[in-house]
Amino acid sequence: MKVLEIGRICTKTRGREAGRKCVIVDIVDENSVLVTGPKSLTGVRRRRVNIMHIEPLEKKISIQKGASDDEVLQAIREGGLEEFMREKVVLARR
């Protein structure tokens, strides 16, 4: 399994935002992380999610713990990942 760390880009696998990409901004505990899209870019609002509901990807951006949505957006732009973040992932139905 890929490492869950601050700045790691993930895909949400459950809920209304399933298939959208997000960035981990804080690790809450062993079962939860705080993610953001940010909403203006991917449609994922800042929220706490269960680690079982996200799938980490290979890509990572450099941000501080608890970074604001503006800081996350800036790091995504600097990494040239805007189009990558906008792409939705088609998830297989179970």
Image (cartoon, helix red, strand yellow):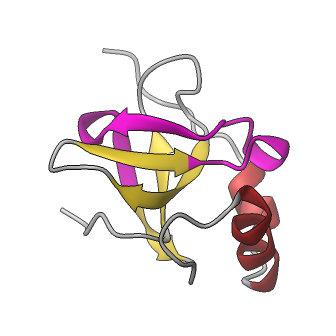
Left of 83 or right of it: where is 65? left
Give how far across and how far down residue 43 sits, in percent: 74, 35
Q: Where is residue 33 in the image (x, y as percent from the top left)?
A: 35, 48
Q: In this picture, which residue range is highlighted in magenta? A: 36-56
Q: Residue at x 48, y 18 (%)?
A: 15
Quadrant the C terminus occupies: top left
Image quadrant assignment for residue 54: top left
Q: In this view, does 88 lie to the left or right of 82?
A: left
Above/below status of 60 relative to 70: below
Out of 51 and 21, give the one closest to the viewer.
51
Q: Does the segment drawn in magenta span residue 43?
A: yes
Picture quarter containing residue 44?
A: top right
Who's the residue at 80% across and 74% down the image? 74
- Which residue is found at the position 66% from the left and 36% from the top? 45
Which quadrant: the N terminus? bottom left
Closest to the observer, 47 or 81: 47
- What residue is shown at x 76% (from left), y 41% (from top)? 39
18 left or right, relative to 72: left
The image position of residue 58, as x and y in percent, is 42, 72
Above or below — where is 47 with respect to 8?
A: above
- Is residue 5 covered in magenta? no
